[in-house]
Amino acid sequence: MKIRIKYFEGATKLKKIAKGNWIDVYSSKELFVPEGDRAMIPLGFALELPSGYEAHLAPRSSTFKTWGIIQTNSVGVVDDTYIGDNDQWHIPVYCLKGHDSKDGVTGTLIKCGDKIGQFRIMEVMPELEFEEVESFGNQDRGGFGTTGTR
């Protein structure tokens, strides 16, 4: 599948990683995020997703360890209508634990080119129609944590 991509200034070119099914994304500018504050990190590209597909954008497993930031919406969903020339992707983050200091403020420094997140594309959910019933006729599984403790 070919997907058209437009790069903005400061962008790192995207490529599929050798192991895994996600594409790494990189900060396209340097920014300092103070501890307890949030920021939108520009990723330096726009994609023309194919009709019927969406992208899921998430932090890498090392993102918190490296920068002390979390993605504010846990996972970002980019749908197939966000395809304009200026629809640059961003990752919203919150700094929980600063690793750096700037002008006496604790925070974290994100550098241009830092591998900050990852994404994959998926087919959109098919049209659903809900059928209301009084009972499913199935056995109850139980509440949260019922599959075991380890």
Image (cartoon, rainbow, N blue to C red):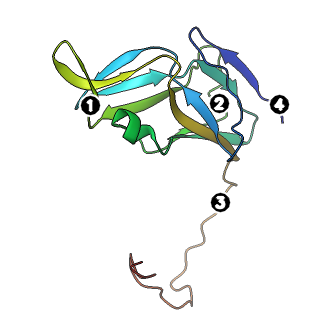
> Which label lies toward us, 1 or 2?
1
Q: Name above or below for residue 107 compared with residue 123.
A: above
Using residue 80 as the reference point, say whether residue 63 is left or right of it.
left
- At mark 4, the secondary structure is loop
- At mark 1, the secondary structure is loop
The reply to whether residue 138 is visible in this rendering is: yes
Q: Which residue is mark 1?
A: 98
Label 4, label 1: how many angstroms apart (C-alpha)?
Answer: 39 Å
> Which label lies toward us, 1 or 3?
1
Q: Earlier in the sequence, mark 4 or mark 1?
A: 4
Residue visible at 75% across and 36% down?
51
> Which label lies toward us, 2 or 3?
2
What amino acid type is highlighted by mark number 3?
Leu
Quarter of the image where the N terminus is located: top right
Q: Residue furthest right?
A: 1
> Which label lies toward us, 4 or 1?
1
Residue visible at 26% across and 31% down?
98
Q: Earlier in the sequence, mark 1 or mark 3?
A: 1
Residues at circles 2 and 4 in contact by the CB criterion of under 8 Å: no
- At mark 3, the secondary structure is loop
Label 1, label 3: how many angstroms apart (C-alpha)?
Answer: 44 Å
Residue visible at 69% across and 16% down?
6
Residue visible at 71% across and 41% down?
53
Q: Which residue is mark 3?
A: 128
Q: Which mark is residue 2?
A: 4
What amino acid type is highlighted by mark number 4?
Lys
Q: Which residue is mark 2?
A: 81
> Which label lies toward us, 3 or 4?
4
Q: Earlier in the sequence, mark 2 or mark 3?
A: 2
Label 1, label 2: how many angstroms apart (C-alpha)?
Answer: 35 Å
